[in-house]
Amino acid sequence: MRTLLLLGLIAFSAVLCFPAAAQETAGVVEGRAVGADGTPLSYALVVLVPQDPEGRRRPRLTQPDGGFRFENVRPGEYRLRLERIGFRTESSPVLRVEAGRAVVHELRSVPQPVEIAGIVADGSCFTLDRLEERPYLAALWAEAQKNAEARRAFERQYRYVYTLRQETVQTFARGTGETEQRDTIVQHIASDPDSAEAREEKRYRQRRAFGIQWLGSLTLDLPEDRELLSDGFLRDHCLEGRVQRVAGNWEFGFRPVRLRRGRIDVQGTIRVDTATFRVTALTFEYLNGDNPFMEATVRYGDFEVPGGVVRLPHAGTFGGRPPGRRWGRLKQVSGTVEYADYRDLRPARPTP
């Protein structure tokens, strides 16, 4: 029997937008994001928000010089929103976009330290509509979300390559003893910004319909930080009211609102740095109904890019036993995953 546990690969990518000729049927919105002293805010998130409620928001990461550019913008009214961890969120006045013309606007923000005070540990769990009942929890969530949104924009704006190395150990019952099977996989993976949005939407629909999947050939589906830090996640999961400060990190837990028999789900802990509010680690416990059967941890690190850093997965561990009897003599699966050598960073083509 030869089986293999694969952690769901976390693929990231990105794109800086470069000037292009304005189309006659569309306009351009561009500008710079700077601090109060005029210092460029590199790799900050700028969102083009249509005033039309049916319109689609468009995120962009700023370039190293703080510049940003939205092309192929349909005529209409929009606002720009600037978000960066540790800075006050800023919105522009309403900007009117006309066909064949460029709108230029500077976004300026000031540092805004986030203080998490008055923490009260309790056993309650809060979905999105109840989060404001615990201001400290809402503040943590909002700051961590900024990084997740910036990562989402990064995925759609850049291409790069990274190396995935996975070591897996499977333990089988053999007579009165045990035997081990070890496997090593090394893959060089190229990001795919062109399909990033479609893949994310497909994953969201699958999650809502089927939960976290334990796939046929021992494939462990690993949620990403962007997924856990989305408003959609807190519709059927909740954040625990207990927040701890441990070794320079805020730690807060999450769990399903309700457990369903025959549906795989996760509960666990999100760790964010107390100074930057960037994710440092995610810990998962996989549940088959109310029965835990597997654990996994992913640790994050900083990837240097021109003009700044981006927080990406660095390493992970996993271990447990798959649920059910179908795996025969397999008693235990464990292993490590390393995400390394992020390289060949380059802009992808601008997306509309």
Image (tube, grey):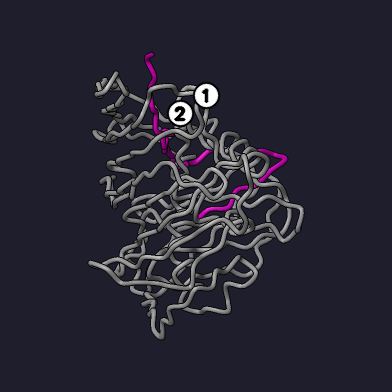
Would you call the spot at circle 2 few (<14 residues within 10 Å), some (14-19), or many (20 or more)? some
User: Which three-letter amino acid code belongs to the residue tagged 1?
Assistant: Gly
Question: In this rendering, is residue 75 above or below 90?
Answer: above
- Numbered disc 2: secondary structure: strand
Residue reaching furthest to the front: 176
Who is closer to the viewer here, 254 or 107?
254
Tag 2 residue:
219
Question: In this rendering, is residue 193 above or below 131?
Answer: above
Q: Are marks 2 and 1 in contact (CB under 8 Å)?
A: yes
Who is closer to the viewer here, 48 or 21?
48
- Numbered disc 1: secondary structure: loop
Residue at 68 percent across and 43 percent down: it is 26
Question: In this rendering, is residue 45 above or below 336?
Answer: below
User: Which three-letter amino acid code belongs to the residue tagged 2?
Assistant: Thr
Q: Position of residue 251 (x, y in %)?
A: 36, 65
Would you call the spot at circle 1 few (<14 residues within 10 Å), some (14-19), or many (20 or more)? few
| Residue 20 magenta | yes
Residue at 43 percent across and 39 percent down: it is 14
Q: Which stretch did the figure color magenta? A: 1-30
- Residue 119 appears in which quarter of the rendering? bottom left
Tag 1 residue:
216
Residue at 58 percent across and 43 percent down: it is 71
Residue reaching furthest to the top: 1
- Which quadrant is home to the C terminus? top right
State left or right for residue 54 relative to residue 165: right
| Residue 248 magenta | no
